[in-house]
Amino acid sequence: MATCATHPSLMLTPPTSSVHPQDLTPSLSSFNPKPLSSNFSLFPLRLKSRARISGRWIDVKLQKEANSRASRVVVASLATKAEVAESVEQRDDGSAANTVTKPKPKKVKAALPLKTERVRYKRLLEVHGLRESIKEYDLKTAISLLKQTANTKFVGTVQAHFRLNIDPKYNDQQIRATVSLPKGIGMPLKVAVLTQGEQFDEAKNAGADLVGGEDLIEQIKGGYMEFDKLIASPDMMPKIASLSEILGPRDLMPNPKAGTVTANIPQAIAKFKQEKIIYRADKTGIVHLPFGKADFSEEELLVNLIAAIKSVEANRPSGVRGVYWRSAHISAMGPSIRLNIRQMLEASI
């Protein structure tokens, strides 16, 4: 490694200074840079006045910077001591409260209780003991158990749930139809009709609860939904296209497949007044269909259930391959009762 030597002509003789060692701060007087070698120093050649004190070179600029840094440290330490003293005095006097704020703990959603830890009501426990969850029942036995489980303080609706082997995302595997239950479902429907011309009076005479044209369309746009079914004549369909976003999510949009778009309005009103039910499969391929009330007799519920099964079997989609029925359950504000598929289909023939 080559060494760097300073030419004798470039050496500067420092002038005599009147600085004395006792005038310097202790930190500066103890400053003793150690050169790497006798010919190489950490300090470059500067054309500034230097003072040689006891064989040590001290840069005046370094002295000023050290003094300024030392003064800053002293000021900061004094300010910190003053703040600590004030906080101690405030706590002793009791005049000021502690201003240190603790971080608030994060709110975490409580985990759902396990199935074994959930609270079961007395009625629900008794109802669950009336039937076996795995066992499959025939129609008469299932309806008899259904009547025993429907012991609520109000009259509940009895529903059937059919899980079908279909995929509704395909057009040839969708199911949407209507069924008229022989014994009704115990809920009178309020029917509204959208029509014009001569059919306006025909709809009123047929027993429609609400009849209108463009005025009724404006009321629906304003939020009027006091009806259960909406029937429309074919000439009104272009005018009610703007209502699809309002009526579609509520399953009230007139549809020819559901029988709510027809030229024979009196006949459609008569069918829906007989409590005609519209059903369709949901995204998972399950059909939910009410077939009566809990206060119906066992015979009335059996007749309605068989009619519902026949309707779902008759409207089997063309795209279904293999087994059509996967499972069937009935319930009435309580645990579901599983039906035997083979016996169910045989009873509906």
Image (cartoon, helix red, strand yellow):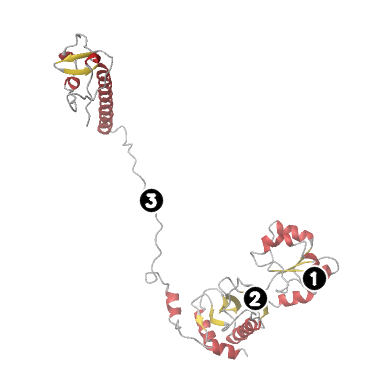
The amino acid beneath tag 2 is Asp
Question: Could you tell me which quadrant the C terminus lies in?
Answer: bottom right
| C-alpha separation, residue under disc 2 versus residue under disc 1 | 35 Å
Q: Nearer the viewer, residue 66 or 292?
A: 66
Rendered image: mark on residue 94: none
Are circles 3 and 1 on residues that touch, CB within 8 Å? no
Rendered image: mark on residue 203: 1
User: How many other residues sit within 10 Å of disc 3, few (<14), some (14-19) or many (≥20)?
Assistant: few
Which sits earlier in the primary sequence, circle 3 or circle 2? 3
**Percent of width and height locating residue 297:** 59, 84
| C-alpha separation, residue under disc 3 versus residue under disc 2 | 51 Å
Question: Could you tell me which quadrant the N terminus lies in?
Answer: top left
**Percent of width and height locating residue 347:** 59, 90
52 sits left or right of 154 in the view: left
Q: Which residue is mark 2?
A: 172
Tag in front: 3 or 2: 2
Q: Is residue 220 above or below residue 149?
A: above
| C-alpha separation, residue under disc 3 versus residue under disc 1 | 62 Å
Tag in front: 2 or 1: 2
Rendered image: mark on residue 106: 3
Q: Is residue 118 above or below residue 133?
A: above
